[in-house]
Structures are given as structure tokens and as C-alpha cells.
Amino acid sequence: MKTDLLLIPMSARYRDMRAAAVAAEESGFDGLWTWDHLRDPDTDSGPGVPEAWTVLTALAEATRRIMLGPLVLNVANRHPGVLANMAATLQAISGGRLLLGLGAGGNRRTPYAAEQQAIGQSVERDEVRARRVVEAIELMRRLWSGHAGFLRPDPPPPIIVGGFGPRMAAIAGRHGDGFNTQAMHPRLADLAKVTRDEHTAAGRDASPFLLTVFAGLDERWLVPDSRQRQSLERVGVERLILLVEPPFDAQEIQRCGRLLGAARSGQTS
């Protein structure tokens, strides 16, 4: 199981995100992610939120090995045709290291609906937003196939659909290349079954499918024989994404990397 870090962007500064990314790569983590939000829902007086795609593109130049991705892009924030070209460009810049997280955005009951309203966008019903995810995936894949001279990513990035219930798990299996949800979700095993069953039913068994989860950074997630990590192994999780809050402590990231490295060495010795 791969172990990644997510740099929470709320009130973060890019120079600190860059330093944390470099420390994560040097410490042996497998991937780097950030959230796609436009404002901090908890404060109106902070420094703001760095834009996800710009940060990832810059981090692609600052790193060499580590995978990169948004967890997850709100399809309402970017036209999928433009996003297709953005993703193909980032694949070229990063040397094929993009994991493209995609989702329906927060619903009207979440604090993140306010950021959409602040920029003049309405927040649509759950079923409409879910349909927008499917439409975005279909359009991006069509453009990536060489349609009308659009830039083609090499290779096409896996599309990992985020969600917390069976609707998005089914969409991920049927249309995506992976599913992301909470590591501590009480129905994780059920959601994993839904998404894999849909992947099979759609006749897509030949294509690899990624089950990824996220959790707060805790040393127990870094220990291979911990109850937490073993529970994910049993469900077949491929990537565990650990959330790190600003201000980012590069030394703490390095310490966690050493713990992870020691655990990996113990598994192979």
C-alpha cells in the first residue's frame, strides 16, 4: 500500500507547501495531494487558499519522483474541456506523475457551498452534480483520444472519483479509474464492493482500479502491523493519503518518513 501526504491549503503559503513537498519526496512518501477550494470556510481574515492546480504544476517542477494530484477537483470550478488540456499539460510537465482526483463538490449543506455562491455559482442538487462528473470524464477521455487536435496526455492520468456514498462509488467504478473516500468510513468495505462490482459490470476488468482513502496524519497509519493499517489492507486499499495541516513542519515530515521507511525495511527483511 502506497502512503501519500495531502497538504491542506487553507491559510497555507506556497513557499511552505513547496518545502513540505520536497521533504515528503526526500523522505520516501509516494504521493502529494492538495484540496481544491477557493476560500477558507473557517475565517474571513486569513491569507486565503492557494489554487490547487497552480500549486500542483509548480510542485511538479520542484519534485522529480513523487506522484501528484488534487483531492479532488470540483467539476464546477473548471470547464472539463479546459481541464482536459490542463491535465495533459501537467502530465508533460511532471513526466506522467498526475493522479487526477475528480468530484462533485460539496452539497448545499456543507460550508464549501459558500465559496461557490461567493463567485456567483449556484450549487446544484446532488444528482445533477453527480451527472456533471460523468459528463466531465466522458468529455476529457474523448479529447484525450486525439479528437480535433487536442493535446494528448502520455499516459492518460488515472481519474480517481471522490465520494462518501454508493452513488459516487458506483460512478467511480463505472466511469473512473479509482475511488477515494475516508479511511475511517463506517461502510468502507461496502463502498469498496460497490465500486469494484460496477467496474466489473461495465466490462472494465482489464483496466487497473485504485481504491484510495484519506485520514489525518497519525503515526499509527505508518506502522504496518497497526490495527488501522491492517484494516485498510484487508479491504484492498492501494493508497493511503495522510492530511497535514499548515504551517508545515518539514522536520516532522522527515521524521514520519523515517518511520515509514523503517516499517518498509522490516517488511522486506
Image (tube, rainbow, N blue to C red):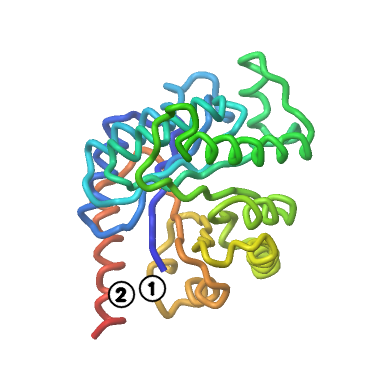
Q: Position of residue 40 (x, y in %)?
A: 53, 28
Q: Nearer the viewer, residue 30 or 203?
A: 203
Rendered image: mark on residue 263: 2
The vertical placement of 30 against 57, above or below, is below
Q: Within 10 Å of the Cα at label 2, are there few (<14), some (14-19), or many (20+) other Cα atoms? A: some
Left or right, residue 258 beside residue 231 = left
Left or right, residue 205 beside residue 46 = right
The vertical placement of 226 against 203, above or below, is below
Q: CA distance from mark 1 to mark 2?
A: 6 Å
Residue farthest along the bottom direction in this orientation: 269
Amino acid type of the residue tagged 2 in the rendering: Ala
The vertical placement of 234 against 161, above or below, is below
SS at mark 2 in the image: helix
Rendered image: mark on residue 212: none
Q: Are marks 1 and 2 in contact (CB under 8 Å)?
A: yes
Left or right, residue 256 beside residue 104 = left
Q: Earlier in the sequence, mark 1 or mark 2?
A: 1
Residue 109 lies in quadrant: top right
Q: Position of residue 266 (x, y in %)?
A: 27, 81
- Residue lying at 29% horizontally and 68% vertically, measured from the top left: 259
Residue at mark 1: 223
The N terminus is located in which quarter? bottom left
Amino acid type of the residue tagged 1 in the rendering: Val
Q: Position of residue 194 (x, y in %)?
A: 70, 64
